[in-house]
Amino acid sequence: MDIEGYELRALKGALNTIDRWRPNIYLEIWEDQIDEMKEWFESIGYRGLFFFDDRLFDISRFDASIHLAEENSWKVGEKNEGFDPRLFVNNFYFVPVRKDA
């Protein structure tokens, strides 16, 4: 899901479906929404994850100074020479936590 900052609004609207089917959810999150999104997903029994440098991490390990470092982001007006999708995190996975785990 990538709807330019309206992800939480859409997810809240889909809460009955999420509760019923417990899908894995993949979405882009803006930096200023990460904490709110993490808390919301935890409140409904989900765990957040992200890939960085080809490794999977729990969202609690997210650090914007590292995972959103400007040198790895898109460069406006350039040929994306600095962009490295392995080293820039704006996509997260949320997976349901097993009740018996």
Image: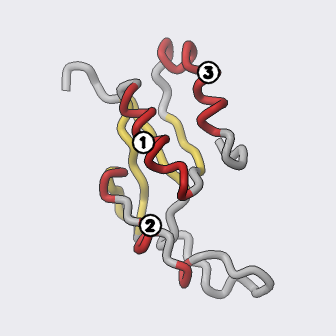
Q: How far apart are marks 1 and 2 (CA)?
A: 14 Å
Q: Dot 2, crowdedness within 10 Å: few (<14), some or many (≥20)?
A: some
Q: Are marks 1 and 2 in contact (CB under 8 Å)?
A: no
Q: How far apart are marks 2 and 3 (CA)?
A: 28 Å
Residue under numbered circle 1: 38
Q: Nearer the viewer, residue 76 or 32?
A: 32
- Residue found at the very far right of the displayed protein: 77
Which is more N-terminal, label 2 or label 1? 1
SS class, disc 3: loop
- Lower position in the chain sequence, tag 2 or tag 3: 3
What amino acid is labelled 1 in the image? Lys
Residue drawn at 44 percent across, 39 percent down:
94
Residue visible at 61% across and 21% down in the picture = 14
Q: Residue drawn 64% across and 21% down?
A: 13
Q: Nearer the viewer, residue 51 or 48?
A: 48
Camera-near label (2 vs 3) is 2
Indicate the amino acid at tag 2: Ala
Image vertical order of residue 30 relative to residue 95, above or below: below
Left or right, 71 with reference to 7: left
Question: Would residue 28 be found to the left or right of residue 76 on screen?
Answer: left
Residue at the disc numbered 2: 64
